[in-house]
Amino acid sequence: RGASTSNSSADGEEEEPAGTRSGSSSGSGLSREALYSVCCSDDGRLVVTGGHSGAIACWDTRSGECVKRFDRGHKSAVTGLVFQKGTMQLFSCSRDRTVKIWSLDDMAYVDTLFGHVQGCMQLDCLRKERVISVGEDRTCRLWKVQDETQLLFKGTPNSGNIDSCCFVNGTTFVTGSQDNSLSLWSMFKKRPNYTLHGAHEAAAMGNPCKSWIHSLAACPNTDLVASGSGDGHINLYKVNPEEQVAGDRVQRVCTIPRVEGYVNSLAFNGDATVLVAGVGQEPRMGRWDRNKNSRNGLFVQRLKVDGGDDA
């Protein structure tokens, strides 16, 4: 698939300050803390949040009540949350270097996956019990949960921390690094199929975080990928690891302009006709910079998706 933007319906909406409600398992005793991650179950009935304290809170979307809170979910900030598609199995990652598994059918902790030697920054999962995670140790790990094994993928020596990742399909995934590069991987190879350097505009001297790849999203089982940074743009790519010419494996097909601020999260709807970005004045995990011209909120872009080999 290729993609082109229609007339933009982008609209920034103000959100609450960095502190957001999180509560006890009974829904009382609300507190405020910075939240770094959020995800929603496939049936839309449960929203899970994780933040600076390491706690994980589960919210009923119909009542707005906190139905369960894991106060000791992690020992450090919760940096990523994702449901296994079609299930109520939740995966979380943290700066405490671990990935944890939770059963929200039973509202219970299941297991902890160890491997990262520095903080884990993001993770993703599709329908199979396979999870990818990336971190400050400049590695990507693919966890085969049922087999209790992991595959290790190392970035280039100068890649910097790997801050973002997402599955394209069950065997292919992409990662984004602080050196402004986007890499396409296959689980069958230890090195990237292709790395696109300079994926976003280079940052000005003294402010490198504007060009870090802060977020990635893919429409699962298609070839459409989006990346966000702090340069004022969201890029869309067509990816295909089977292309004979290496440079054709990651092709930028469209740029969405006028996204003021840091694109800290991205998500497609089911048929890739809408792309939603979480935009902030500051990077998600630190106050290295502040864009005073930006507003904390959502940026919504409608897309026209063309099928066919020549799209």
Image: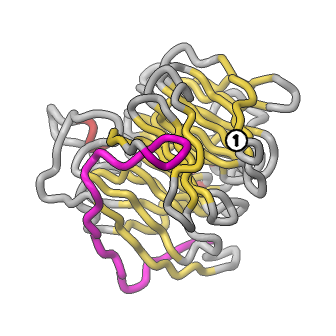
What residue would you read off at disc 1? 107
Residue 168: percent from the left, percent from the top? 67, 53
Provide the major secondary structure of the magenta segment. Answer: loop
Residue 268, image x, y percentages: 55, 65
- The location of residue 181, given as percent across then percent down, is 44, 40
Q: Is residue 236 magenta?
A: no
- Left or right of 282 on screen, residue 274: right
Q: Quadrant of residue 278?
A: bottom left
Q: Quadrant of the N terminus?
A: bottom right
The vertical placement of 243 against 68, above or below, is: below
Residue found 69% across the figure and 45% down from its top: 125
Mark 1 lies on a secondary structure that is loop
Name which residue lies at 30% across and 62% down: 297
Query: Which quadrant of the structure image shows residue 300?
Result: bottom left
> Which stretch did the figure color magenta?
1-28
Up the image or down, 223 lies above or below 288; here it is below
As drawn, is 92 to the left or to the right of 156? right
The crowding category of the residue bearing disc 1, from other C-alpha atoms within 10 Å (few below 14, some 14 to 19, many at least 20), is some
